Image: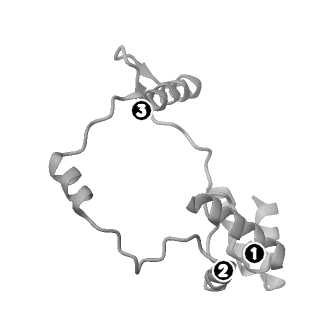
Amino acid sequence: MEQVARTGENHLLCGEIKDAFASFRQPKQKCATSAPLKALDGKLLSDRASVAARWQEYFRTLPNRPTQSPPDALVFEAKASMPDSTINTFPPTITEVYKAMNKIKAGKAPGVCGTYPEYIQHGGSDALRTLHKIVTQVWK
């Protein structure tokens, strides 16, 4: 605990506020525990391995459900509708990706992938081209 306090104070003295508070929060962080879960037969699962196995089993069954037909009214409306030619449906250009990349606010938390906004902004032309390639692949 003393080591964590010293590290935090050193960060404060150097003006590294984010790092200081990150080190102060470190002792409060706990390891993730999973809540008990019921198996298909009704038994209560409490250990991590069996809970994880049950979640895997559950998510494997999700995409295997039979599809349902859309309502007739929706099908009729879809057939009767006309495409709007004023809406641009082409993938974004590299200029549009550049403009969006520059609108990202710095100092925000990273996303699911763990990439900080600053990494994207300061990545240069290589990061811009890679981001554009990803966006166009997702667009298709």
Depth check: give the residue in front, 34 or 136.
136
Dot 2 crowding, Cα within 10 Å, few <14, some 14–19, many 20+: some
Q: Position of residue 42 (x, y in %)?
A: 34, 17
Instruction: Name the residue located 75 percent from the left edge and 75 percent from the top edge.
Output: 128
Using the image, determine if residue 27 lies above or below residue 62: below
Q: CA distance from mark 1 to mark 3?
A: 36 Å
User: Contact (CB < 8 A) between labels 2 and 3?
Assistant: no
Q: CA distance from mark 2 to mark 3?
A: 35 Å
Q: Is residue 137 left or right of residue 33?
A: right
Q: CA distance from mark 1 to mark 2?
A: 8 Å
Instruction: Name the residue located 73 percent from the left edge and 74 percent from the top edge.
Output: 120
Q: Is residue 17 left or right of residue 11?
A: left
Amino acid at circle 1: Leu
In front: label 1 or label 3: 1
Q: Position of residue 3 (x, y in %)?
A: 82, 61
Of the numbered discs 1 and 3, the one sitting upstream in the chain is 3
Mark 3 element type: helix
Q: Position of residue 20 (x, y in %)?
A: 74, 74
- Residue extending farthest top: 41
Depth check: give the residue in front, 129 or 48.
129
Using the image, determine if residue 32 lies above or below residue 46: below
Q: How many marks?
A: 3
User: Contact (CB < 8 A) between labels 1 and 2?
Assistant: yes
Instruction: Name the residue located 54 percent from the left edge and 24 percent from the top edge.
Output: 53
Amino acid at circle 2: Met
Q: Residue tagged by mark 1?
A: 128
Instruction: Name the residue located 84 percent from the left edge and 84 percent from the top edge.
Output: 14
Dot 3 crowding, Cα within 10 Å, few <14, some 14–19, many 20+: few
Depth check: give the residue in front, 39 or 72.
72
Q: Residue tagged by mark 2?
A: 101
